[in-house]
Image (cartoon, helix red, strand yellow):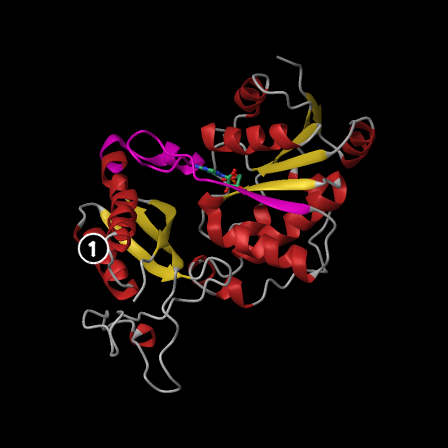
Amino acid sequence: MCVVRIARTKAELRAARKALPGTVGLVMTMGALHEGHLSLIHAAEAECDSVVVSIFVNPLQFGPGEDYENYPRDLDADIALLDTTNVKLVFAPQPEVMYPRQPLVRIDPGTIATRFEGKTRPTHFAGVLQVVNKVFNLVRPDYAYFGQKDAQQLALVRTMVADLDMPLVIRSVPIKREASGLALSSRNAYLSENDRIAALALNQALTIGRDAAAHGASPAQVRERALAYLTAADGVKIDYLDLVDPDTFEELPLVDGSDGPAEDSYDAHEEHVWEAEGGAPAYPTRGLLITAAWVGPTRLIDNMEVEFLGA
Ligand code: AMP
């Protein structure tokens, strides 16, 4: 048990940061903290001498019509939860502190940000990388911890850190799930009782895909089976479900292990179909099965690593 110090301004943060001993780990959050956030904090505590948590609902990463206004905010509950950890410093600024004016210099997140989440939320990742960059500069952590839950965000943060030679190490932390399999998310607070049941289909679809791969299914079959399950699920409207390279978020070639196009390739996604021209793509050893879907009015994301047995 320890008392958490809350810095609300950059000056307060600077002063408190100076007093932190040893290596510093950073966990960035938008608050409404849950066990998923705690697993990031515990990973940081295990590796670093001091841990800083930021709590900031970043307006720049919300598009028009998204849930910025309604996003759950409860700083007192968050601090009470952090009091059960060894976190000594929380940075919880108001938007005016972070953005005294609209920033003129912006981060261009590049092509990864144009796919999947970025297709549905075109300004999202530029807003994420803007705030990540700012908080990195303010906190100057040695390590920063991001959840595998937001896999595309993680890939983009890693890419930014590599491309801009940012002087810190990025760690990823596995997805924390409820016993039901539902990935923990602050947005789960929006789910009705029925929605919570319908939402289980996301994890179930991904699990079906992963298990199929473990039994020798090809990338095409894995994607098809997961997609078929989620398509048939009640109360779920799919935004996307796909099999991608976890670093680039490019779709995996849907090879089927034989020497021709996968029989069950999904017609609506012509670009995925195996192409003989230029030679067959290499049979992948691993991939990331990713999905986003609306359950009632709530948009949820989930993903799962998949390992292929081989052609
Ligand atoms: P958020 O507050 O939703 O912006 O999330 C803050 C950080 O916590 C991000 O790095 C997320 O990926 C991570 N996170 C959120 N939910 C989970 C979860 N269920 N398991 C692991 N990490 C998570």
Q: Quadrant of residue 8?
A: top right
Residue 135 magenta-highlighted:
no
Q: Residue at x 70, y 55 (%)?
A: 103
Residue type at the position of mark 1: Thr
Residue 233 in picture, x, y percent from top left: 18, 48
Within-10-Å neighbours for mark 1: few <14, some 14–19, many 20+: some
| Residue 27 in view in this figure | yes
82 left or right, relative to 224: right
* As drawn, 184 above or below 150: above
Kindly state the secondary structure of the residue where label 1 is placed.
helix
Q: Which residue is mark 1?
A: 231
Q: Residue at x 50, y 63 (%)?
A: 248
Q: Nearer the viewer, residue 310 or 41?
A: 310
* As drawn, 251 above or below 232: below
Residue 185 magenta-highlighted:
yes
* As drawn, 101 above or below 112: above
Label 1 CB-ligand 1 distance < 8 A? no
Q: Residue at x 55, y 37 (%)?
A: 30
Q: Farthest residue toward the bottom?
A: 277
Magenta segment boundaries in residue numbering: 169-195
Residue 157 in picture, x, y percent from top left: 60, 53
| Residue 91 in view in this figure | no
Residue 210 in picture, x, y percent from top left: 30, 50
